Image (cartoon, rainbow, N blue to C red):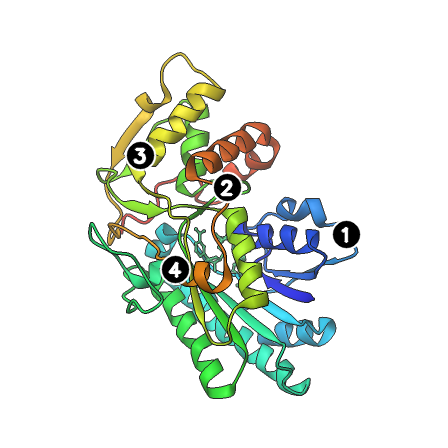
Amino acid sequence: MKILVTGGAGFIGSAVVRLAVSRGHAVVNLDALTYAACLENVAPVADSPLYAFEQADIRDPEALTAIFARHKPDAVMHLAAESHVDRSIDGPGAFIETNVMGTYNMLQAARSFWEAEGRPESFRFHHISTDEVYGTLGATGQFTEETPYAPNSPYSASKAGSDHLVRAWHETYGLPVVLTNCSNNYGPYHFPEKLIPVVILNALAGKPLPIYGDGSNVRDWLYVEDHADALLLVLEKGALGRSYNIGGENERSNLELVQTICAILDKLRPGDAPYADLITFVTDRPGHDARYAIDPTRIREELGWRPSVTVEEGLERTVRWYLENEDWWRPLLERHGVGERLGKA
Ligand SMILES: NC(=O)c1ccc[n+]([C@@H]2O[C@H](COP(=O)([O-])OP(=O)(O)OC[C@H]3O[C@@H](n4cnc5c(N)ncnc54)[C@H](O)[C@@H]3O)[C@@H](O)[C@H]2O)c1
């Protein structure tokens, strides 16, 4: 299958590109190369005859039309997005332009191409979204695919808007779509402005480990390579027009998560004092959702998917990867906004 992956130079998109090529799919990676992108993320497959790269912006409809005509993909996996909640608080406009308008442009370009090709039933437009569209949970309960949308941040609102567009393009125009909403990812190639890489890299530098509020916010963590595996499964086997929640069944409070990372570092790179001594509580993020948890029953029962690693195993792999790949992360620390406290509003 030839898959057009948008956002393939980012964290999750690059995991999809690497896995898809390793499974014998042809991949066209469409990415604007924003501050969050890194072409080194796809270096392991960049020389493969199955891989092609197109630097393009999903806010540019003409560029998208040309790329569909040039490559004639069998499927689209749409991951390109502005993805950092803190940045969405400081500058929501870019999130509306890329996540809402960009998705609209992708849908229109895909629809024109699909109609010109005779509306093949096998074509797929897979929209990759987040569990943050459901808003926040209390101490109990889980998000199912039937949970009403109630996004709380400009980021999650922009993703919710894009999900609604994708659903409407299926209902109105018949475009063959599938949707997924996933919990927090972590793993290799995670851009060093997100919590887990920030904690690992600050600890190695002897800097404070910032935790928002009292650290009680709970997230359901999923190893990025497990997510990529689930995404390819939904692309190939998911029912048309259906959405699937993807989660790791690994709920941890932010404080527990950071303490686990510190314990792994104490083992792999012992310092003079326990790394947990560096934990520092900082002013909370405005609108910070208390808890996310995914009910993955649908993807497990209908498609037979479940995550392959626990959060402890995945975190140890991740810490080892950062210890071994300083050449990857060191230059990224110089990028705009990295290492600064953003989104205090
Ligand atoms: N990170 C998570 O935990 C998580 C969880 C669930 C869903 N998601 C979703 O998965 C997708 C990928 O997330 P990520 O964490 O890999 O993001 P990321 O920020 O690491 O990567 C985003 C990629 O999209 C590209 N991009 C941004 N704007 C673009 C534009 N206008 N045109 C073309 N390319 C553009 C960037 O250059 C970058 O390579 C997003 O849609 C996100 O909403 C992320």
Q: Is residue 315 visible?
A: yes
The amino acid type of the residue labelled 4 equals Thr
Q: Residue furthest top?
A: 272
Position of residue 342 relative to residue 304, above or below, is above
The nearer-to-camera label among 4 and 1 is 4
Q: Residue at left 59%, top 54%?
A: 16
Instruction: Give the distance between the C-alpha atoms of the residues marked 2 and 4, in whole angstroms.
Output: 24 Å
How many neighbours does mark 3 have within 10 angstroms: few (below 14), some (14-19), or many (20 or more)?
A: some
How many neighbours does mark 2 have within 10 angstroms: few (below 14), some (14-19), or many (20 or more)?
A: many
Looking at the figure, which quarter contains the N terminus? bottom right
**Label ID, residue 48:** 1
**Residue to which mark 2 is pinned:** 187
**Residue to which mark 4 is pinned:** 297
Instruction: Give the distance between the C-alpha atoms of the residues marked 2 and 3, in whole angstroms.
Output: 17 Å
Q: Kindly indicate whether the residue at mark 3 contacts the one at mark 2 (C-beta within 8 angstroms).
A: no
Q: Position of residue 293 (x, y in %)?
A: 32, 53
How many neighbours does mark 1 have within 10 angstroms: few (below 14), some (14-19), or many (20 or more)?
A: few
Instruction: Give the distance between the C-alpha atoms of the residues marked 1 and 2, in whole angstroms.
Output: 23 Å
**Residue to which mark 3 is pinned:** 256
Position of residue 108 relative to residue 330, above or below, is below
Q: Earlier in the sequence, mark 2 or mark 4?
A: 2
The amino acid type of the residue labelled 2 equals Gly
Instruction: Give the distance between the C-alpha atoms of the residues marked 3 and 4, in whole angstroms.
Output: 25 Å
Q: Earlier in the sequence, mark 3 or mark 1?
A: 1
- Answer with left or right where residue 79 lies relative to residue 163: right
The residue tagged with tag 1: helix, strand or loop?
Answer: loop
Q: Earlier in the sequence, mark 3 or mark 4?
A: 3
The residue tagged with tag 3: helix, strand or loop?
Answer: helix
